[in-house]
Image: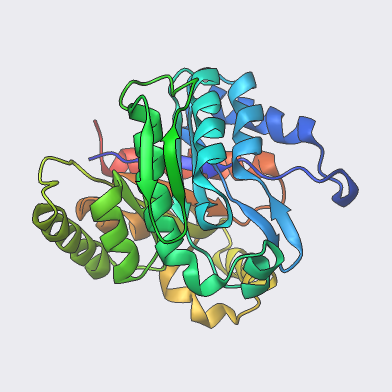
Amino acid sequence: MMPKVLVPTGAWNFRAGISAEEVLAGARRAEAAGLDGVFAGDHVTFYGHGNDGLVALAAVAAVTERIELRTSVYLLPLRHPTPVALQCAMVDQLSRGRLVLGVGIGGEDPQEYWSCGIDPRTRGRRADEALQILRRLWTEPEVTFQGRHFQLEGARLDPKPFRPEGIPLYVGGRSDAALRRAALYGDGWIGIWNSVRRLKEAQEKMTAWADEAGRSGVSFGYAMQFWVGIDRDAEKARQTLARRMEGFYRLPFQSFEKYVAYGPPEAVAEFLAPYVEAGLQDIHLVAAQESQEAVIEAGVAVKEALGRIFPS
């Protein structure tokens, strides 16, 4: 029952005081510390800020050997799926099959879509079509596809991913539409801001929708992203976490508080344990710490605390 624990790669921005060397050194530390993986967020211009998840993971792939590499989540509807399929295949080859593509549709900042020339109202349908195209380009010699937003005629892709079956596709999101998308086109789901009850409902709904679609043989993976604050002083951890989240999401901390954890690593692990008992396999920890090194230390501490709850 012991879950995988992953931490964010961080994003380099020289003018903001974060170098690429720091980010890559952090990935190497995460691997050396025994964490299971790292994940990269993705935005083109989220309230003006961006980070290309696949570019980040390509760099990380070049300096690591073991850890899993995930996007959580890549805004697939902002791109055409054919070049994305090639980018993913090349990162998967570079990493020898360590890439997991977690995708989402975003939309919290509609201007991000308009800035890319895309109507945000089309993002769900674009994601549905793109997911189908990715899988086919990775596994078929030639692809013809006629959709509302994407059309391919005899498209071929080489190189293909390192793994013959392609790259695992996880779909992120809170809505039933996201769960249905995962059930029909994905290999797993990445949740955020969900209760244990909602996790159980997600499993039931995805199983039912997959069965209806003739995908009853798929064994879905379940992951969730959690913001946490790690400190022996719980109130200090709460204040740091609140400040960081309000700055990022531009919403009051009270909107999120029931879905986050803060305090010593043991308290955070106790918060996460019911999710693991309900079938959660992968934990994406977004730790509001003062440095990337502290983020990794927090991830290790939580993983060790979980190991005491779920000994192998």
Name the residue rendered at 65%, 53% in the picture.
Answer: 289
In the picture, the quarter occupied by the N terminus is top left
- Asked if residue 169 lies left or right of residue 242, the reply is left
> Which corner quadrant of the image does residue 206 belong to?
bottom left
- Asked if residue 20 lies left or right of residue 300, the reply is right
- Asked if residue 90 lies left or right of residue 55, the reply is left
Q: Is residue 244 visible?
A: no
* In front of the other: 260 or 42: 42
* In front of the other: 50 or 84: 84
* In front of the other: 103 or 141: 141
Q: For the view shown, which residue lies furthest in the front direction?
A: 153
Rendered position, 208 above or below 253: above
Percent from the top left, x then y, of residue 120?
A: 55, 71
Percent from the top left, x then y, of residue 251?
A: 61, 80
Q: Can residue 219 be seen in this view?
A: yes
Name the residue rendered at 54%, 53% in the picture.
Answer: 286
Rendered position, 74 above or below 251: above
> Which corner quadrant of the image does residue 60 belong to?
top right
Name the residue rendered at 42%, 74% in the picture.
Answer: 258
Q: How many marks?
A: 0
In the picture, the quarter occupied by the C terminus is top left
Render colour scheme: rainbow
Percent from the top left, x then y, of residue 32?
A: 55, 22
Percent from the top left, x then y, of residue 111?
A: 68, 72
